[in-house]
Image: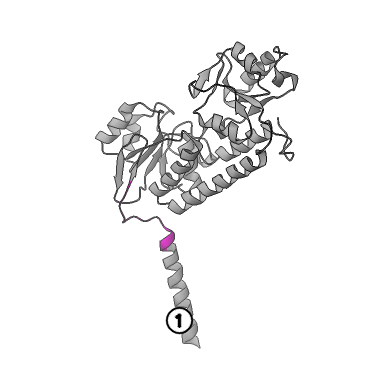
Amino acid sequence: MRCFRFALLFIFLLWSAIACLLDRPAHAESFQVTDALGRTLTFSKTPRRIVSLAPSITETLFALGVDQEIIGVTTSCDYPPQAKLKPKVGGLTTPNLETLVAMKPDLVISVKGLHKFELVSEMDRLKIPFYVSDPSTVKKILQEIRVIGRLTGRAKAGEQLSETMEKRIEAVEAKVRGHQRPAVLYVLWGDPLMTVGPGSYIEELIRISGGRGIVPEGRPAYTQLNMEEVLAEDPQVVIFASEMGDDTVAAERQRWLRWTTLSAVKEHRLYTVDSNLLHRPGPRLVDGLEALARLIHPELFPDQSAK
């Protein structure tokens, strides 16, 4: 009987060790990925020293369980709180090249359009793998999370995170389906008046959450409007991005009250949203989507009131 118990204990320990090994990122198998610039990156092992050059990338890495591997972030990477403790490589659009190189990363991840191409060229020259993501649509954001999961040896976590986000997106779509779509103006900045247009993923989120943007087709994804255009479109909902700052948002709200013929003003539907949830195309994007849905259709989301 003692031998039998010993054999069972041995099998249990052996299986536990195997399970741990299977759950760890693979290092031996080589793999390739193609980034947003059409560059093919080849890896002989899973990167273990990673630098993130965008807040959305940092949030994605943490959400995937990639913590110890992050050796550098930008000064704008402030979520989750642990990200603030990571060494800094410089500002969001101006990372310090010398600091970056000195960290000896085996993977740097950025976002398309965020940095000058010279930085990419220099990384290529120094043979430092530099992956450029393209989170320009909701579908691509989910795809990039899967790719980053694969890059960091967390493919399963990437799939699971994407699937969870996708289900939450589908739940919002289902809830607003068949209901009236109010016209929505999303204010990125007040003076000059900057907003989102067709082709931006934020405008796509407005549509998913049951609204419709007021910018006509053919305009840039991020565009400027004048008040004559706004008054002609007569948005029923105006949403200010908190990124402008509390004082600026408060001043904007007061300034908009003068447009007494505007439906959003008459119906007292001037709102503010946490722009970090929307301007960072990562895991918290679905939180931003649900926040938009509550503002646009409060009657469908009575559990939380608009602010």
Q: Which residues are magenta?
A: 21-32
Image quadrant containing the C terminus: top right
Question: Mark 1 falls on what kind of element?
Answer: helix
Residue 25 visible to an observer of this rendering:
yes
Determine if the magenta segment contains residue 177. no
User: Given the image, on which type of amino acid does mark 1 rest?
Assistant: Ala
Q: Going by the picture, which residue comes out furthest to the left?
A: 125
Left or right position of 188 against 51: right
The residue at which mark 1 appears reads as: 7
Where residue 8 appears, as percent x and y from the top left, is 48, 79
Q: Of residues 194 and 24, which is closer to you in this image? A: 194
Residue 279 visible to an observer of this rendering:
no
Residue 258 position (above or below residue 210): above
Residue 59 position (above or below residue 158): above
Left or right position of 15 against 273: left
Where residue 91 appears, as percent x and y from the top left, is 43, 28
Determine if the magenta segment contains residue 27. yes
Q: Looking at the rendering, which quadrant does residue 187 occupy?
A: top right
- Tag count in the figure? 1
